[in-house]
Each structure stands twice: as structure tokens, then as C-alpha cells.
Image (tube, rainbow, N blue to C red):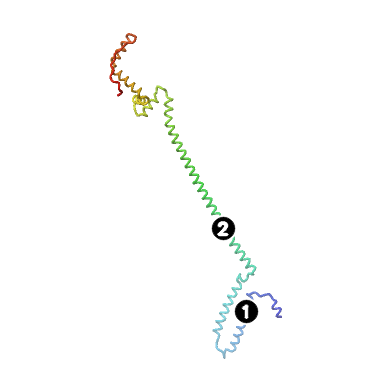
Amino acid sequence: MDQDIGSEAPADPAAAAFEALRREVALLNVALAGLAAERASAPDYSETLGEIAQGVRVAVGRIGKLATSPALAATPAEIARQITAAGDEARRQDRATLHQAQEMLQRAAGDLRGWVDTARLASVQNWRLLQAALAGVIGGAVLGASFPVIVAQAAPEQWAWPERRAARVLHRDMWPAGERLLAVADLQRWQEMQAARRIVEQNRDVLARCVTAAQKAKGAKGCLISVDSLNAS
């Protein structure tokens, strides 16, 4: 019979605990019965036994709660599955967190590339705007310098626009401006013209009478003029 008992499967821990508790309670009842029979000759242990009984009831309640706990009710296979499920859930949350971090990093990298491209494009646009502005200034300067000349040359000759423009450039009236141009163009010829002008001015009356006599004679007429120093003034 001992062999049969040894070959039986291990009992449930909660059932074994209840069985041990039952035996202790039974022994306690026997002891209480014996004590009640010998009450007259033995000391009164009722208060102590009441405290023991109260402690036993508290222990029974705690053992009952422990027996009904899901942790003790579950089999080792179920506990292993729960541990595996908890590990899978933790790994899933870790993968989700890692995926979110990767997406945030990718978005940050994309934003950074966008900012760099925008800054580079703005720099190129600013350089092109500067080039366009410089081209406009140069073109405006060339056009401003050449357009009046083109217009002046295209105007009728009697308007004398080129001569007037030359006088404005020299900041003089047209006659002084012409004298300045003649003197700069050929100084010797300018000095000769000035000497001839002085001769005419010195002999203006004589030349006038000579011209009148020549017109009356309808031919050449000799005239006597006086000439002072011809040094240019």
C-alpha cells in the first residue's frame, strides 16, 4: 500500500494546506474536549485557547485568500505563457517607441535638409538679384550716357542739340564753349584766328570804307590798314 501511495501524483499545495489545517483544528477540538472534562481539576485556559482559535481563524482566512489567488491557481505552463506574453508586449512597446524615434529623427533630418536647401536657394537668389541690380545700374549708366547723344544726333541740324549739349557739359554759353573747343582742338590756329580778329577790330572803319569803295568800283580796291602787335592775348 505504501507503494501505491508513493506512486500517486503530488497533491495540490492549497489542498494539502487545507488538509493540514483541518487536522490541526481536529486536534484542537480534541484538546478542548479533554480540557473541558478536566476543567474542575485543571487551570482555566479558555482565554488563551480563544486567542489561539482567533489566530487559527485569521490564518485560515489568509490561507483561503492565498488558495483562491490566480497565481496559485495557474499552472506552470500558464505562468510561462503569461511571462512570454508580457515579454512580447514589452518588446512590442519597445519596437513602437524605437519606430517613433526613427520617424522623429527622419523628420528632423528632412527639416534640416529643407532649411539648408532653402538657405542655399536664398543665397543663390540674392546673388542673382545682385547681378541683376549691377547689370541694371551698368545698363542704365550706359543708356543714360548714350541715349542723349543718340537723340541729339537724330534731331534736326538746325536745332543744334549736340552743340547745346557740349556747351552744357562745359558749363558755358555756346560762344565761350566754341572758343574753348577751338583752342583745345588746335591752339596755333586758334591764336591765328585771334590775331585776325584783332586786325579786323583795329581797322573796322578803314575796312568798311574800303568795302564800300570796292562795291562802287565793282572790282578790287586796295586799302591801307594799320597792324599792332599780334601777340595773342
Q: Nearer the viewer, mark 1 or mark 2?
A: 2
Quadrant of res 80: bottom right
Q: In this view of the protein, which residue sits in the foreground, 95 or 19?
A: 95
Which residue is painted at 59% across and 73% down in the image?
A: 66
The span from disc 1 to disc 2 (Cα, nearest Å) is: 53 Å
Query: Could you say which disc has been placed on residue 132 in the image?
Result: none
Is residue 102 shown above or below 62?
A: above
Quadrant in which the N terminus appears: bottom right
Residue for point 61% across, 83% down? 27
Residue 57: give x, y in percent of width and height: 58, 78
User: Residue 116: horizontal and vertical position, in percent?
Assistant: 50, 48
Picture coordinates of residue 40 (x, y %)? 57, 90
Q: Quadrant of residue 141?
A: top left
- Determine whether, in the image, residue 142 is placed left or right of residue 54: left
Identify the residue position indicated by label 1 in the image: 20
Q: Which residue is mark 2?
A: 98
Q: Residue furthest bottom?
A: 41
Which residue is located at x 62 percent, y 79 percent? Answer: 20
Q: Is residue 167 left or right of residue 79?
A: left
| Residue at disc 1, secondary structure | helix
Label 2 sits on a secondary structure element that is: helix
Sequence-wise, which precedes: disc 1 or disc 2?
1
Is the residue marked by circle 2 packed among few (<14), some (14-19), or many (20+) residues within 10 Å? Answer: few
Report the amino acid beneath label 1: Ala
